[in-house]
Image (cartoon, helix red, strand yellow):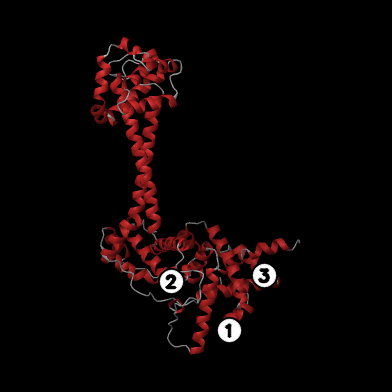
Amino acid sequence: MLWRNPHRRFQERLSAYLDGELSPDGARALQAHLDSCDTCAAEFADLRMASSALAELPEVEVPRSFALTPDLVGRAAPQAYGARSASTGFRLAGGALAAALAVVLVLDAGGIVDNGGEHAGGGDEFRQGASNYDATSNAATSPPVGDASIAEQGGAATGEDPEASPGIGADGEERSFQAPTPTPAATEIPGDAAAGLGLNGSGNDDNKTLATGDLNDDSGDGLSALTVTEIVLAALLGASIIGIVAATYAGRRRG
Amino acid sequence: MEKYDDEPDLVARSREGDLAAFNALVERYQRPLYNLCLRMLASPEAAEDATQEAFIHSFRSIHTFRGGSLKSWLFRIAANACYDEMRRRRARPAVSLDEPHGADERRLDVRDSGPAPQERAEHRELAEALQDALTRLPPDQRLAIVLADVHGLDYSEVAEITACSLGTVKSRISRGRRQLRLILRERGELLPSHLRQVSEGQNDVVA
């Protein structure tokens, strides 16, 4: 047993010794051991045999020339590597969309929307920051959609006297639910979706108005744009997920 | 290994998309690369695919070559192409890699002109036994052994090609060779007499 450990330690170095990769001291110590240990000497001889047998393996001639042709380079490029980068592109796009959707959902569901951005109610710092962000994100992502499809609702909301909105039928319960807790995402989203589809713009408008505690003329417009942004983003996200799956599948089949 | 003076120039021209310049490099390195792939994959068809893939990839990424040994850089790409090929064939095993005695004879191609038929047959058998033994090693050990023993590279070159530390290279070669030794021992009668003598004889080292 005492013998066993140094023995193994030497055996692990035999290959490096064979290749001349041991330090001079290590090589001397190992040679001394080999001189006195038949087991290690036999193993060393075997290793050397294996190594020289491999070294003597004949080099095989190439079966053909591997010279590249323009065709080979051009064809191989999009096939082998283009597919990979396409699916990476899909993934990036999906990630970006998911992030954008998350931001919009948080802003919307949190009832943080304050359309002007210049007067945030209550001096709430978070709200202030968020509404500024919202203003930019709206500007960047939604104007075309919002302008096109929500104009009607916006018009209705602006046309209405703010005082009159509490009187709008079905909103009563929803508003009272909404007022104490301005952030339940689950209750908020269906209403928004409906608004985005042009079914119930004013109800949604009302929610927001209460949540921010600040009535604003174009709040209907901003809200609806936000909602539409959400829907569009969700749709794009779904499409890009399908794209990722398709690209991955195609890549696997090809590979 | 030989040094080529015109290599930097060929690389520079390849970088600019000069296919002819790159093909001069292909001409130069296709044989070692193909042999590396062949020892790794044990199948001429797979080796052909991997070699071609390696050159295509090299051409397309030659701008990432930062000087140093072009051969090491190419070997590294070829080794990766071999790993890719192994994965591909494992996923779709139309051609089995576990068939070292396949019908294709090219692998056993021993073209040294001259030796007597019996000696030829002996060589052939030995080459087959060695390839068989190599194929049974884990790929990482196989790669290290092939680079060190078949291609005669030193440990630092193997480390560069495999992107491993010297210690890892040392341990892979050690484990791989010990494994190989056991496999070969089983078929010791195959070994040509001069190698058998090595195995029985001297333990002094010329290092």
Within-10-Å neighbours for mark 1: few <14, some 14–19, many 20+: few
Q: Quadrant of residue A136?
A: top left
Within-10-Å neighbours for mark 2: few <14, some 14–19, many 20+: many
**Are dots 1 and 2 on a single chain?**
yes
Residue B138 is left or right of residue A36, and the answer is left
Q: The C terminus of chain B appears in which quarter of the rendering?
A: bottom right
Q: Quadrant of residue A12?
A: bottom right
Q: Quadrant of residue A160?
A: top left
Q: What type is the residue that disc 1 sits on?
A: Ser
Q: Which residue is mark 2?
A: B35
Residue visible at 47% across and 68% down? B41
Closer-to-camera residue (B153/A255): A255
Cα–Cα span, label 1 and label 2: 26 Å
Q: Nearer the viewer, mark 1 or mark 2?
A: 2
Please state the chain letter of the residue tagged with numbered disc 1 in the rendered image.
B
Within-10-Å neighbours for mark 3: few <14, some 14–19, many 20+: many
Residue A136 appears in the rendering: no
**SS for callout 3:** helix
Check the image and report above or below for A171 versus A227.
above
Cα–Cα span, label 1 and label 3: 22 Å
Q: Which residue is mark 1?
A: B193
Please state the chain letter of the residue tagged with numbered disc 2 in the rendered image.
B
Q: Nearer the viewer, mark 1 or mark 3?
A: 1
Please state the chain letter of the residue tagged with numbered disc 3 in the rendered image.
A
Q: Nearer the viewer, mark 2 or mark 3?
A: 2
Closer-to-camera residue (A48/A213): A213
Q: What type is the residue that disc 3 sits on?
A: Cys
What is the x, y in percent for residue B1?
41, 70
For this orientation, the residue located farthest to the front is: A169
